[in-house]
Image (cartoon, helix red, strand yellow):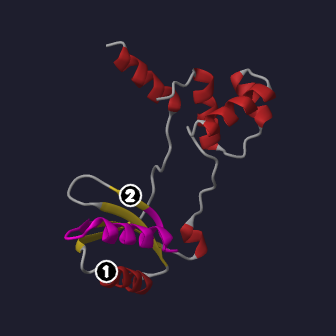
């Protein structure tokens, strides 16, 4: 586990707010030189604390249905399971694939243009893997109120408080 100091937490919070913020602006806010900020960012990337990426908004591209699907599998060997996972990972309409604990085995996020498109994609996946899919539940995402946003200063403080208990 990596320990982050306050300046790194602030840098990460600033980058979450605006990933295009200049190194100069970050440096001013954390009272460091531009070179120091750049070194810190590169070090955090190298340690895989975060990775720079863009976040695409599927609805702006005509994919109005963003669907969270829970899948339960059964009666499958490792080879069948790997084939299923690879299929999901390579599918152009599936944005996320997670193995999860609990009542379901997988959680995926699928994007579709409309209900007809969603039905065709879902049916295709379910038919292709009907031997191993035992349960399927879909829910349409209507509004994202918070998505992958972490307040690093608060998280690190919580972590420190628990260590000191």
Membership of 66 in magenta stretch: no
Query: For this view, does 106 lie left or right of residue 158?
Result: left
- Asked if residue 77 is positioned above or below residue 157 in the image, the reply reads below
Assess whether mark 1 and mark 2 are in contact (beta carbons under 8 angstroms).
Answer: no
- What residue sits 46% from the left and 29% below the top? 1
Tag 2 residue: 98
Membership of 86 in magenta stretch: yes
Give the quarter of the image for residue 163: top left
Q: Which of the image's four quarters has the C terminus?
A: top left
Question: Which SS class for mark 1?
Answer: helix
Q: Nearer the viewer, residue 160 or 61?
A: 160
Give the quarter of the image for residue 160: top left
Residue 158 location (% of width, % of height): 40, 24
Classed neighbour count for the residue bearing mark 1: other residues with Cα under 10 Å, few (<14), some (14–19), many (≥20) = some
Residue 107 location (% of width, % of height): 34, 61
- Asked if residue 36 is positioned above or below residue 102 in the image, the reply reads above
Classed neighbour count for the residue bearing mark 2: other residues with Cα under 10 Å, few (<14), some (14–19), many (≥20) = few
- What residue sits 36% from the left and 12% below the top? 164
Q: Nearer the viewer, residue 15 or 90?
A: 90
- What residue sits 64% from the left and 32% below the top? 11
Question: Which SS class for mark 2?
Answer: strand
Q: Which residues are magenta?
A: 71-96
Query: For this view, does 156 lie left or right of residue 7?
Result: left
Q: Residue furthest top?
A: 164
Give the quarter of the image for residue 57: bottom right
Residue 141 location (% of width, % of height): 40, 64
- Res 66 seen here: no
Tag 1 residue: 126
Residue 49 location (% of width, % of height): 55, 37
Query: For this view, does 165 lie left or right of residue 97?
Result: left
């Amino acid at each position: 586990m990596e320990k982050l100091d306050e300046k790194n937490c602030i840098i990460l919070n600033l980058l979450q707010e605006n990933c295009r913020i200049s190194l100069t602006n970050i440096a001013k806010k954390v009272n460091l030189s531009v070179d120091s900020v750049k070194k810190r960012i590169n070090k955090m990337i190298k340690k895989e604390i975060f990775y720079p990426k863009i976040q695409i908004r599927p609805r702006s591209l005509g994919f109005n249905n963003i669907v969270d699907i829970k899948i339960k599998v059964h009666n499958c060997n490792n080879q069948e399971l790997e084939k299923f996972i690879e299929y999901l990972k390579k599918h152009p309409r599936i944005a996320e694939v997670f193995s999860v604990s609990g009542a379901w085995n997988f959680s995926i996020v699928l994007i579709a243009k409309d209900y007809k498109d969603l039905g065709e994609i879902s049916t295709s996946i379910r038919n292709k893997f009907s031997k191993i899919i035992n349960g399927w539940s879909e829910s349409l995402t209507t509004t994202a109120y918070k998505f992958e946003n972490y307040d690093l200063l608060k998280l690190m403080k919580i972590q420190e408080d628990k260590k000191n208990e």
